């Protein structure tokens, strides 16, 4: 009995030692684990904890507004609510459950959510937009159940808004979301993956001025993702407003005038300063389609063969008889003709076995009447007498064949002055008198843009200064061309007579100030002809130059383009606008 009792006491004495060893072993393991976590991976784990606890809520900058010269809004911003998912918080296994809950809650097809999530995957782990433009009731339903929708969030976005729809679309331009390639290139300049950038027009040309600077709010959240407190905030800096030289009522008149043609352009500028008062193109588009993005069918329409996105005011076309101003100036400046010189006009002009028809036959007439009635045979003979060099010299002096200086640099084409050197270099052929004949009336290898044409008419209207067209007010830039005053006076007389008794009589309206101008009808085989009008008013002290162009309109300059210009003159010289100028 004593031996048994001793054995039991011995076993009981060893049990606390065993338990102590077990406790020490587990404690050592725990201490080692804690040391490993704290010392070796402490910084990494603290960073992970902070990532789960602290979130940065970015704040979009408000893009600067575009205003007309009187401060009327042409482009602004509007708020919209979008649905996002944070890919780092929602695994592929957890996604189906979240997707189905969102689909039921917000009445969005599950397949659409799947498609958006797959399309938005990115290596950086940025949140993915699942739906845009949520309605107020959808936002409210989401907010009510947000605590059970871990990984999903609804946030405010800022979209560009054009309150006048299509008006001025080509000159204002549009914005769209930044691409991955652009983001890689621009992220160092403060751009974010959610940014929108200007794609055309003023929106693109003045992107740094308009875009603003992102802000953000650093918040602490609990395990359910609910905000507990705000740790810090950096307000977003709004972009700067931009006041343009455009005049809203005149721009509206230009858009209405272009409703009569399928394709074309109108430009109106101040002949003294070059300030652009209206610039419109057809066909056009609604820039609001890009806020946030056009549908597949809308994108297809925007890329139709008629090219609605193309700004035709900056594209080159054959100028036809509007170019006779250049030939007139060249002849008078060459010394071969005086202001009172005359040249023969005939119903048919034949040269080198080829005959060219003229719609007038008035015998010998001077430059003013030749411009007024737009006699081709007059300019055939004048061109042959002086040769091509004075014609192309005058064209270059008047700004053709080069950039105008307008801010829309990337969209502007230079046109074409196909002189003897160009023909030899490009076509490998020598210049012939027939080339001179066609060039003298603005046909052949001659292309000018409506904006370049506006510069030419401005130079005649302001007494010989080549202005720089511009869309944002600045100190006027203009260069003295050096033409003799009697040259410009003679041409001005011809443009005035064209309205009084010639091809531009559509503008001879007593309700309007005396106007001056020239029509043109350009061949474009096998397509229909182009219609042109260029002019200014008042004839004695011009304040507005207007170029109207109908691409392949099939009508004459006097019947298609001149009435378009008349609509702008009627608007500009109304009493309520006159006081604004």
Image: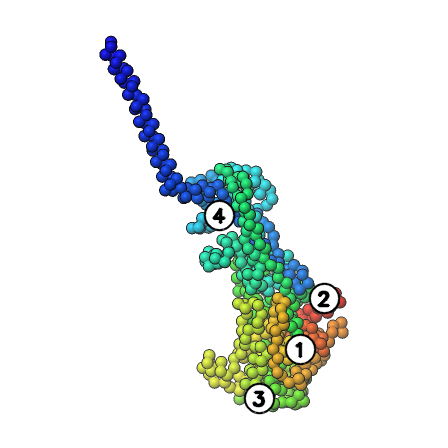
Residue denoted by label 3: 386
Q: Answer few, some or many: residues within 10 Å of disc 1's Cα (few below 14, many 20 plus, some between 14 and 19).
A: some
- The reply to whether dot 1 and dot 3 touch (C-beta < 8 Å) is no
Q: Position of residue 396 (x, y in %)?
A: 56, 80
Which residue is depicted at the point 32% across and 24% down?
A: 19
Which residue is depicted at the point 72% across and 78% down?
A: 540
Q: Quadrant of the N terminus?
A: top left
Residue denoted by label 1: 462
Question: Residues under labels 4 and 3: Cα distance?
Answer: 70 Å
Q: Position of residue 456 (x, y in %)?
A: 62, 77
- The reply to whether dot 2 and dot 4 touch (C-beta < 8 Å) is no
Q: Is residue 3 above or below residue 522?
A: above
Left or right, 219 with reference to 547: left
Q: In what element is the residue under mark 1? A: loop
Which callout, 2 or 4, points at the residue further toward the start of the chain?
4
Question: Residues under labels 2 and 1: Cα distance?
Answer: 21 Å
Q: Answer few, some or many: residues within 10 Å of disc 3's Cα (few below 14, many 20 plus, some between 14 and 19).
A: some
Which callout, 2 or 3, points at the residue further toward the start of the chain?
3
Seen from the viewer's position, the closer of residues 260 and 325 is 325
> Could you tell me if residue 155 is visible in this image?
yes
Seen from the viewer's position, the closer of residues 315 and 225 is 225
> Could you tell me if residue 347 is visible in this image?
no
């Amino acid at each position: 009995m004593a031996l048994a009792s001793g054995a039991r006491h011995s076993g009981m004495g060893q049990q606390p030692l065993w338990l102590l060893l077990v406790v020490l072993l587990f404690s050592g393991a725990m201490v080692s684990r804690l040391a490993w976590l704290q010392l070796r991976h402490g910084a990494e784990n603290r960073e992970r904890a902070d990532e789960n606890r602290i979130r940065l809520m970015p704040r979009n900058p408000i893009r600067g507004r575009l205003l007309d010269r009187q401060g009327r809004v042409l482009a602004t911003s509007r708020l919209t609510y979008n649905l996002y998912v944070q890919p780092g918080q929602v695994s592929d296994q957890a996604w189906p459950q979240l997707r189905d809950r969102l689909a039921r809650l917000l009445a969005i097809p599950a397949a659409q959510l799947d498609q958006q999530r797959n399309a938005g995957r990115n290596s950086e782990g940025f949140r993915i937009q699942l739906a845009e433009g949520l309605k107020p009731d959808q936002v409210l339903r989401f907010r009510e159940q947000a605590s059970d929708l871990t990984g999903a969030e609804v946030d405010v976005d800022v979209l560009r808004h054009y309150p006048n729809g299509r008006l001025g679309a080509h000159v204002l331009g549009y914005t769209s979301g930044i691409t991955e390639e652009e983001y890689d290139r621009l992220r160092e300049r403060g751009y974010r993956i959610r940014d929108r950038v200007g794609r055309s027009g003023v929106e693109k040309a003045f992107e740094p001025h308009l875009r603003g600077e992102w802000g953000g709010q650093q918040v602490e959240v609990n395990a359910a993702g609910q905000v507990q407190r705000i740790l810090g905030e950096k307000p977003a800096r709004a972009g700067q407003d931009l006041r343009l030289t455009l005049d809203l009522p005149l721009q509206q008149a230009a858009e209405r005038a272009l409703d009569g043609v399928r394709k074309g352009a109108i430009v109106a500028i101040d002949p003294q300063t070059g300030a652009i008062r209206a610039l419109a193109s057809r066909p056009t588009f609604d820039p609001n389609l890009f806020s946030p993005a056009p549908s597949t069918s809308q994108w297809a329409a925007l890329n139709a063969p008629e090219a609605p996105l193309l700004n035709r005011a900056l594209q080159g076309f054959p100028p036809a008889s509007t170019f006779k101003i250049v030939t007139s100036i060249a002849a008078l400046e060459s010394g071969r003709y005086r202001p009172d010189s005359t040249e023969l006009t005939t119903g048919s002009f034949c040269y080198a076995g080829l005959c060219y028809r003229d719609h007038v036959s008035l015998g010998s007439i001077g430059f003013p009447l030749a411009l007024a009635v737009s006699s081709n045979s007059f300019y055939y003979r004048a061109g042959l007498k002086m040769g091509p060099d004075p014609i192309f010299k005058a064209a270059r002096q008047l700004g053709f064949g080069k950039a105008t200086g307008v801010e829309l640099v990337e969209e502007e084409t230079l046109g074409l002055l196909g002189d003897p050197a160009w023909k030899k270099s490009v076509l490998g052929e020598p210049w012939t008198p027939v080339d001179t004949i066609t060039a003298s009336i603005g046909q052949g290898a001659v292309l000018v843009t409506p904006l370049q044409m506006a510069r030419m008419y401005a130079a005649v209207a302001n007494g010989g200064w080549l202005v720089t067209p511009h869309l944002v007010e600045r100190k006027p830039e203009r260069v003295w061309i050096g033409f003799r005053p009697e040259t410009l006076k003679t041409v001005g007389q011809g443009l005035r007579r064209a309205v009084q008794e010639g091809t531009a009589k559509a503008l001879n309206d007593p309700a309007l100030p005396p106007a001056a101008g020239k029509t043109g009808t350009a061949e474009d085989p096998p397509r229909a002809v182009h219609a042109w009008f260029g002019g200014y008013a008042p004839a004695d002290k011009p304040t507005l130059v207007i170029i109207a162009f109908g691409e392949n309109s099939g009508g004459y300059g006097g019947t298609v383009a001149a009435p378009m210009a008349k609509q702008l003159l009627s608007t500009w010289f109304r009493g309520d606008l006159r006081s604004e100028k």
